[in-house]
Amino acid sequence: MSFDMSQFHAVFFEESREHLESMESLLLAVDIAAPESGDLPAIFRAAHSIKGSAATFGFTDVAELTHVMETLLDLVRNGAITLTEEMVDACLAAGDVLRNLLDAHQGHCEADRAAAEAIRARLSVLAEEAQRAVGGAPSASGAHKRARTYQLGFAMLPGDPQADESIANLITELKELGEVIDARPPVDGTRVWSVNLASDVDPETLRTVLEFVVDSTSVTIDVIDTAPAVPQAEAAFGLFDDAPGAPAAEETAYGFFEPLNEPAQTNTSEDLGYGFFEPVPEAQPATPPEASDGSYGFFEPLPQPAAQAEHLAPAAAAKLEVAPRSTTTAPTQPTKDTGARPVSKSDASSIRVNIERVDQMINLVGELVITQAMISQAAGALDPVLYERLHHGIALLERNTRDLQESVMSIRMLPISTVFNRFPRVVRDLSSKLGKRVELVTGGENTELDKGLVELIADPLTHLIRNSLDHGIELPERRREAGKSETGRINLRAYHQSGNIVIEVADDGAGLNRSRILAKARERGLPVSDGMTDQEVFQLIFEPGFSTAEQVTDVSGRGVGMDVVKRNISSLGGRIELESMLGVGTRITVRLPLTLAILDGMSVGLAGETYIIPLDYVVESLQPTPAMLKAVSGVERLLDVRGEYLPIIDLHEAFDTPGDRSAYEGGIMVILESDGNKVAAFVDALIGQHQVVIKSLEANYRRVPGISGATIMGDGHVALIVDPPQLVSMARRAGQGAA
Amino acid sequence: MVDANMQMTVAQEGRVVAGEFLTFTLGGEEYAIDILKVQEIRGYDAVTRIAGAPEFIKGVINLRGIIVPIVDLRIKFKAGTAEFTPFTVVIILNVGARVVGVVVDGVSDVLTLAPEQIRPAPEFSSAIRTEYIVGLASVGERMLILLDIERLMSASEMALVDEAIL
């Protein structure tokens, strides 16, 4: 496929995808019954921006589709029609189609014309129906149904050299508030402009806007009419003029005026006709002609997220069927994301930087830290009195270098919400398709992980969630029979634990059926026995081709997937665990090693070595007195902390340090808490508190019991990071062994 | 029989048949490894000891932000004394996807060896299993022991790689 990948196109694609993304998240977040005032315009703006630039670059198909969507959104935005669940669905589906079109323009896949046409028809029908349902004559007045017409009079400040420009800006601003019916420049001898404006804003707002620009003493605001004149309606649609590539679409926009001449009908048969006839002649493939057959090119094995492609294809097929349905019945209960939606709507200004540059920077800073350490060491030999200023400078350098290193490191980190954000959509689409009611609860969205991991973890997680939805959560009736609430719940949670990022996908569904898995395994000739533990049995579902689904749906059940999930997770160095109870639910835990993460740690000295204890686990640290140490069978093993007896873990023993052990009285006890168990870890000294960058020890070495990773200290030395949970379980095991 | 096998291995694996080798000394012995496996050579720095590691694993160092384990081949091969002098060097190797450092007494030179210079190693008992020795090469008076460093470093006895136990 020959495609001109000029840089402008690249920017366009990137921007459009961003707009689509923000539109999607807004659509998912919007409260259908009572949309927040800012949401609808924001959704509209996203569609509008895409349309504008698509038309500029000649991507007619994209422009046409967005135009129809925009038309619908515009009506909703202006309050002419009310937002319905179906509109949101349609807009979401349109977003998918747009993505496909964008991909096609980039040469990634073939455009799905049929889907594009179907969704276009669906959107037009929706807009039309909704308008008819409202009942009124859907003229431009509908756009500002509570509008009043103001007559505004104002004069520019005398001697303003940029008066013309100010006026132009002002009128643009007024257009945003309402519909500028006409604007008459000053007649001879006065400086007074006269503007007729149809708007639903109150006069005070208008005054504020005006006074900001013009001579405040000259402002007059009169209400002349509460029903604006219809003939000026085109002005409202002036927005569409910037889509030269979409002449055909223009017609659909004006199609809204049609119902004026017809009796208001909510008859679906007519809608059906409308849905099918109208869009077909417009199919004008602007891109690769071979794509015009409208085939489902999605099935090509794309590197693109498979989940997305999978769900696009059936969705496209389903569209024609859905289109004629009236707005009165929403197909399913809306799925709600009750999880705290991160406030960051990517409004924060950002720049795009090639990741290689960031990595290069990280490497360079790494080198800088080492060089800095070298200088410090060399200067350490110099007389501190004679070279006081040098020492001072080096101390500053050290601090700055460390700060620099930390901030550079954090560039690569992304909150996991970037992955989680896509799931409300997945859950919503899938649950309505499966006729299930599911609530997605997310937690720990701000857990940061490396960008590289973020990209790689998205697909396996999507799969796990789809799996939970399809196989885990039962249908509402069955849930009711089982005495559960009809709405199932999927918990998605991320957190840091012992140097891993842990992501949990838990559902309160049917759970895994041990006997069915065993039966299936026998059927497939796998070596199984009834004596296997639940864990072993559950691991079978990760076998390639293993599926216990009674029927293969288009969502899952083909037995492809869990093995791929497991393989993907393993390739990231992670582990996957599964707990399940029949009838209660399933929890899948994915543990990924931290490739790059920053941790608040306490550094402790142990026989001349430095170890880092993650601060999250530290309850307190204290110097033990002989009275606090309690011996059990002649060995001091318990520490009495305000009446609580805590087992002592001597880190010298745990880490097998060389040299003599110091007496407990001379050192420090660090009280650690992990999973509700407290222990007292004995160390020689507390050194300080740092933010450390976690480095993988396993990348080049192997796992070390009791150690979760390593870090590089300011002087370039490596310090090992203690893994308190493992330490606690090691201590317990040792205790059991002794007993 | 053994010889024939050895030759076959050498011939098949190809990577050690001929080419450039880095030679280093351990005690009085000279070893050679495929130079393409060598990332860099550096001095011996303080290492961070790892609990529970075998004696020949000195610990880990920070190599420009990567944590790299250091193996003292002198201890592993029972050759030379494990003293650290300013001349002690660490050869940083790239084996598989991993980075490992090995401590040796000194690096001698880089040699190009022709296939005819390389003889199969006879079966003998030593601290190194013969499967890690691809051959012996004679250069003038010197005898070089050609190591399959990649196989050696990924061997379970080196305890560098996670075993199924953990």
Image (cartoon, rainbow, N blue to C red):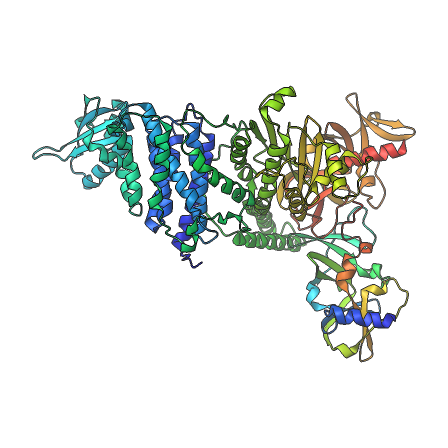
Residue A369, how many percent across, how many down?
61, 52
In this picture, residue A624 sits left or right of residue A385 = right
Residue B64's quadrant in the figure? bottom right
Image location of residue A412, percent across then percent down? 56, 46
Quadrant for the C terminus of chain A, please.
Answer: top right
Residue A188 vertical position relative to residue B14 in the rendered view, above or below: above
- Would residue A271 be found to the left or right of residue A575 on screen? left
Q: Is residue A167 above or below residue B134?
A: above
- With respect to residue A582, does A455 lie above or below? below
Residue A521: in sight, yes or no? yes
* Residue nearer the viewer, A422 or B54: A422
Q: Residue at x 64, y 50 (%)?
A: A384
| Quadrant of the image occupied by residue A214 | top left
Residue lying farthest to the right in this orientation? A633
Q: Nearer the viewer, residue A94 or A666?
A: A94
Expressed as whole percent of the image width and height from the top left, the position of residue A203 reads: 25, 23
Residue located 78% across and 42% down the image? A705
